[in-house]
Amino acid sequence: MRKIVRELGSRGSHYVNQNKPTGVWANNQYFDTFALAKSKDVFDLICSPFVEHFCSKYLGDYLLKCHRYYETYTVHKMPWHTDAKNQLSGLDISITGVVFWFT
């Protein structure tokens, strides 16, 4: 995890006026939606035997999505929300899923 934090963390490389993916600051939160593309360690973690076994056992056929790197600091409000939206209609849809928090 420390290597991932070094690779993707808010104190890591930020690119200005370069065609490279970088994280975003929003108030007191930093997040990076390009974690899977930027880090082999994130890839190895997301595709680990543990995650594969857990998802297969509890979900059957599954799709990994919404993989992000977050740093949330004090005073930041991050209300719980869902990414299970139908992209065409914008309506919530029923999807069985699981959230993994690695710290």
Image: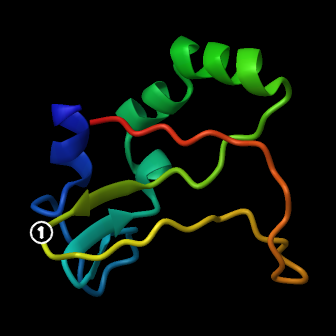
Residue under the point 90% across and 83% down: 89
- Measured from the top left, where is residue 47 in percent x and y? 56, 26
Give the position of the C terminus as an image quadrant.
top left
Residue 23 picture quarter: bottom left
Residue under the point 16% across and 34% down: 2
Number of marks drawn = 1
Residue 86 is left or right of residue 17, and the answer is right
Where 11 falls versus 27 (above or below)? above
Q: Decide which of 12, 73 is in the foreground and name it.
A: 73
Where 62 falls versus 47 (above or below)? below
Residue 85 is left or right of residue 31, and the answer is right
- Measured from the top left, where is residue 95 in percent x and y? 81, 51
Judging from the image, the colouring scheme is rainbow
Residue under the point 41% across and 37% down: 42
Type of the residue with mark 1: Thr
Give the position of the N terminus as an image quadrant.
top left
- Measured from the top left, where is residue 38 in percent x and y? 40, 50
Q: Decide which of 23, 27 is in the foreground and name it.
A: 27
Q: Decide which of 85, 10 is in the foreground and name it.
A: 85
Q: Secondary structure at mark 1?
A: loop
Q: Which class describes the residues within 10 Å of circle 1: few (<14), some (14-19), or many (20+)?
A: few
Residue 29 is left or right of residue 6, and the answer is right
Outermost residue toward the right in this view: 89
Residue under the point 40% across and 76% down: 19
- Measured from the top left, where is residue 68 in percent x and y? 45, 55
Q: Which residue is mark 1?
A: 74
Q: Decide which of 66, 83 is in the foreground and name it.
A: 83
